[in-house]
């Protein structure tokens, strides 16, 4: 099974495993699809039971039926936010799919060297390793461009965003960071075996909550990372997400997807640019002329409509 779809939060042995009846599963999966685009059909009943059993116990309910009644009656949005937190997997790591960071620094960022500002979006950033990897690789490989970079990192999970905004990671989490970057930009904290991302990298990243199935903020990006997120969605949601991401790229901008994500069979205007990397054409799609290698692109700076997370 793909690591991002592994069951998590199995209840400890002292808690009885709750039975998730078909009716309650349908209520939960319908809500998760409607509100977050999650595709929980076909055979996902045991996965949902495993992920939510502990939550049901924590809330003091003795059945999924009681939990569903509470979920559907909650008007604050808080119960839904927790549901999203528990149903999605936040598996991530520093420099995950490392060739992407080489390509970013060797090809993508230099393409924007004439832009006063380079706007990057890490969409579905989980606990922050992805946006910080972008910042660290830029600082290490293209330091002359790093000060122009602004990374917006978003996720649906407030729990992950809170963790990300602390920028603090255990020693084993930072192992994939190249040694030269680790020694320079990961600072030991007072807690044992714990490191904090240095201010030089932290200041490039700003976190906000955003649900990818909601309308997007009025922003255009030079680069979007949306990796290992699409696998949660059904086909129409996946297709609509790719089209929205493409619409929010600058002409000549790049979209990075996960190596196990796919755009095949999806109607979109992007062209393949590298392994799991796509580029928006600089001119209208009906043009048959090839893209020039080093585009001069003017970045757009607009205000964000997402909900900012404070560190
Ligand atoms: C498996 S992690 C991937 C993290 C990172 N992009 C990477 O590749 O390592 C997927 C993330 O997508 C987020 N996610 C799932 N559905 C989402 C949605 N509808 N809107 C925003 N984020 C979502 C999850 O909360 C999770 O943190």
Image (cartoon, rainbow, N blue to C red):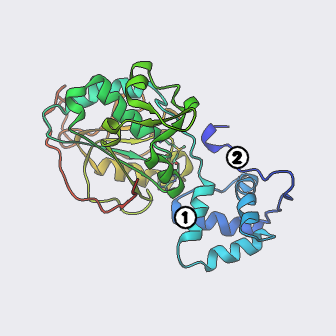
Residue 200 found in image quarter: top left
The residue most toward the top is 180
Q: Position of residue 187 (x, y in %)?
A: 43, 32
What residue did someone put label 2 on?
7
Q: Which residue is label 1 attached to?
A: 81
| Between marks 2 and 1 in the image, the one whose residue lies nearer the viewer | 1
User: Of the numbered discs in the image, which one, if any, rests on residue 112?
Assistant: none
Which is more N-terminal, label 1 or label 2? 2
Relative placement, left or right, of 60 versus 205 is right
* Mark 2, other Cα within 10 Å: few <14 / some 14–19 / many ≥20: some
- Seen at 44% across and 19% down, the residue is 179
- The residue lying toward the viewer, choosing from 243 and 294, is 294
- Decide which of 112, 13 is in the foreground and name it: 13
Residue at the spot 50% in from the left edge and 45% down from the top edge:
127
Q: Position of residue 216 (x, y in %)?
A: 34, 59
- Any atom of ligand 1 within 8 Å of the CB at mark 1? no
Q: Position of residue 234 (x, y in %)?
A: 55, 53
Query: Helix, strand or loop at disc 2?
Result: loop
The residue sitting at 50% across, 58% down in the picture is 158
Front in this rendered view, residue 248 or 100: 100
Pointer 2 with pointer 1, Cβ within 8 A: no
> In the image, what residue occupies the spot 35% across and 28% down?
137
Query: How much space separates mark 2 and mark 1, taking CA atoms?
Result: 19 Å
Does residue 96 appear to the left or right of 23 in the view shown? left
Q: Is residue 12 visible?
A: yes
Q: Is residue 124 visible?
A: no
In the rendered image, residue 228, in percent from the top left (x then y), is placed at 51, 41
Question: Which of the 4 quarters of the picture holds residue 193?
Answer: top right
**Left or right of 82 in this view: 283:** left
Element on which disc 1 rests: helix
């Amino acid at each position: 099974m793909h690591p991002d779809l592994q069951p998590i939060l199995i209840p400890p042995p002292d808690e009885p495993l709750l039975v998730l009846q078909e009716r309650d599963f349908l209520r939960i999966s319908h809500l998760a699809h409607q509100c977050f685009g999650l595709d929980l059909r076909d055979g996902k009943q045991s996965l949902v039971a495993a992920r939510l059993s502990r939550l049901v116990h924590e809330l003091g309910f003795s059945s999924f039926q009681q939990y569903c009644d509470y979920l559907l009656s909650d008007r604050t949005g808080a119960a839904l936010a927790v549901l999203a937190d528990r149903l999605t997997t936040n598996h991530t790591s520093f420099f995950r799919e490392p060739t992407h960071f080489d390509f970013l620094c060797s090809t993508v960022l230099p393409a924007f060297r004439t832009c006063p500002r380079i706007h990057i979006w890490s969409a579905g950033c989980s606990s922050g390793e992805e946006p910080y990897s972008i910042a660290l690789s830029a600082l290490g490989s293209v330091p002359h461009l790093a000060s122009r970079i602004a990374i917006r990192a978003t996720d649906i999970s407030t729990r992950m965003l809170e963790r990300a905004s602390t920028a603090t990671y255990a020693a084993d989490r930072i192992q994939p960071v190249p040694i030269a970057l680790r020694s320079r930009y990961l600072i030991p904290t007072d807690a044992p075996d714990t490191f904090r991302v240095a201010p030089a990298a932290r200041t490039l990243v700003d976190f906000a909550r955003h649900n990818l199935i909601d309308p997007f903020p009025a922003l255009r990006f030079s680069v979007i990372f949306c990796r290992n997120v699409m696998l949660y969605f059904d086909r129409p949601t996946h297709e609509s997400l790719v089209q929205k991401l493409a619409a929010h790229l600058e002409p000549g901008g790049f979209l990075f997807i996960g190596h196990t994500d796919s755009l095949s069979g999806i109607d979109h205007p992007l062209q393949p640019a590298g392994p799991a990397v796509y580029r928006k054409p600089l001119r209208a799609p009906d043009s048959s002329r090839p893209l020039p290698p080093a585009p001069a692109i003017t970045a757009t700076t607009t205000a964000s409509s997402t909900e900012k997370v404070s560190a």
